[in-house]
Image (cartoon, rainbow, N blue to C red):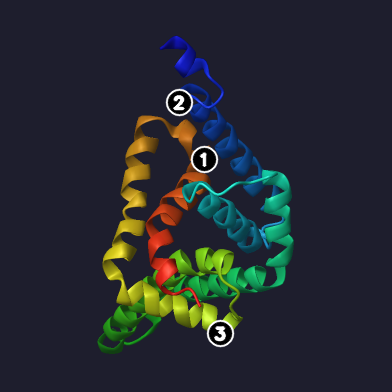
Amino acid sequence: MQKKYLNYDGPLFSFFKLVYKILLLNFLWLFFSLALVSIGASTTALFYLSFKLVNKESIASIPQAFYQSFKLNFKKASLIWLILLTAFYLIYVNLININLIPVELAKYIYFLQLVVFFELLLISIYIFPLLARHHVDLFNAFKASFVMANRHFLTTIKCLSFFPLIYLVLSWNSFFVLFTAVFYALWVAYILKGLFIQYRT
């Protein structure tokens, strides 16, 4: 029994290999996100490796695979990231200045901004995983993300359920904040892997 657990392919070593991969992915994501503008490409690469992990696909070299995905998707993913960031910022500016609008009009504008914010949030859940798994242009990346997020709303809710869960984990031990991005990517990849197969062309 002891030999079984200490075997290289046993559950103990498999667990430590998984922990090592998570730590390595976390480091790579943080390092490649340092430029801030590169967060989109770094997140796409993170999802690329996360899908491989949840699908139990072989990975010859995690750093090499991460860099290749980062480099391949850099322009498109960075542009998507900047578009989303700008859109969220504009909504924020609109909301904090809502009092400058007449009250009767303000309540409609406020509701509209919340709807747009929510839809952007849903798009942001799907768009980087989509880019990691499919060759898609900028317009269709946003379009497909919007369609999938709303058509498969239960799946979207499952993805969003990560946030209250991670909140509970961080309330217990804030150390895990360092691994939030990796845990989120693995969570979403696990949920979306079956859905993306349906949209494979």
- Mark 3 or mark 2: whose residue is earlier in sequence: 2
Q: Secondary structure at mark 2?
A: helix
- The residue where tag 3 is placed is 139
Count neighbours of disc 3 (C-alpha within 10 A) and say few if under 14, some if 14 to 19, many if 20 or more: few
- Rendered view: 191 above or below 124: above
Q: Does residue 60 show up?
A: yes
- The residue where tag 1 is placed is 179
Taking depth in this image into account, of 80 and 93 the one nearest to the observer is: 80
Amino acid identity at mark 3: Phe
Location of residue 85 in the rendering, given as x and y in whole percent from the top left corner: 56, 69
Count neighbours of disc 2 (C-alpha within 10 A) and say few if under 14, some if 14 to 19, many if 20 or more: few
**Residue that appears at 31% across and 63% down:** 155
Q: CA distance from mark 3 to mark 1?
A: 31 Å
Amino acid identity at mark 2: Pro
Q: Does residue 34 show up?
A: no
- Nearer the observer: mark 2 or 1; the answer is 2
Q: CA distance from mark 2 to mark 1?
A: 22 Å
- Rendered view: 72 above or below 189: below
Location of residue 141 in the rendering, given as x and y in whole percent from the top left corner: 53, 78
Q: Secondary structure at mark 3?
A: helix
Amino acid identity at mark 1: Phe
**Residue that appears at 59% across and 68% down:** 81
Q: Secondary structure at mark 1?
A: helix
Residues at circles 2 and 1 in contact by the CB criterion of under 8 Å: no
Count neighbours of disc 1 (C-alpha within 10 A) and say few if under 14, some if 14 to 19, many if 20 or more: some
Number of callouts: 3
- The residue where tag 2 is placed is 11
